[in-house]
Amino acid sequence: MEKTLIILKPDAFQKRKVGATIDRFEQAGFKIVGAKLTKLSSAKLREHYAHIADKPFFPEIEDFMSSRSVLVMALQGKGVIDRVRSLVGPTNSMQAAAGTIRGDWGTDVMHNIVHASDSPESAAAELKRFFAEGEVY
Ligand code: ADP
């Protein structure tokens, strides 16, 4: 069964939307198969965001993402990768439709509540990045 990697970002905690965000995933029928609270190191963030690590705004992302602990989760279900991306909405919260997680609770392009893998290839790499063998059930 397909799996995806979710990160509940620091703004989800600051706005107390962790439970509500998880509820959206559960109500959509997805199963939580892995979860851990962790603080993201600079090395981990550079690896995870390698595709934007050379952008001028990356130091800001690094500060934001390491500002407090985050909840990393593995979700499982049919078509979970694309369906979760639809529930989450586009990167820029200002352009995200009402009813999407980012549209309802995100602030801007950086403070957008949640990360979700965008393809089977990234999901596989990201699950491996954050969960050791035996930590996904
Ligand atoms: P997504 O998270 O939707 O897959 P990206 O992989 O492009 O989007 O970007 C990763 C994260 O970096 C975004 O979720 C957002 O928090 C931040 N980000 C992306 N673009 C910008 C930007 N122009 N300014 C500030 N932060 C950004």
Image (cartoon, helix red, strand yellow):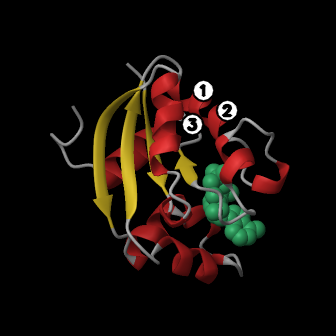
Query: Mark 2 = which residue?
Result: 86
- Quarter where residue 108 is shown: bottom right
Q: 137 above or below 96?
A: above
Element at badge 2?
Answer: helix
Q: Label 3 to label 2, Cα distance in Å?
A: 12 Å
Q: 108 above or below 117?
A: below
Quarter of the C terminus within the rendering: top left
Quarter of the N terminus within the rendering: top left
Query: Mark 1 = which residue?
Result: 83
Q: Residues within 10 Å of mark 3 (few under 14, many from 20)?
A: few
Query: Mark 3 = which residue?
Result: 119
Q: Position of residue 83 (x, y in %)?
A: 60, 26
* Residue type at numbered disc 2: Ser
Q: Note whether residue 19 is visible.
A: yes
* Residue type at numbered disc 1: Arg
* Residue type at numbered disc 3: Ser
Residue at 32% in and 53% down: 130
- Residue farthest right in this picture: 95
Asked if the residues shown at circle 1 and circle 2 are in contact, with their CB atoms under 8 angstroms apart, the answer is yes
Element at badge 1?
Answer: helix
Residue at 51% in and 42% down: 20
Residue at 50% in and 57% down: 16
Residue at 48% in and 34% down: 23
First in residue order: circle 1 vs circle 3: 1
Q: Position of residue 101 (x, y in %)?
A: 65, 43
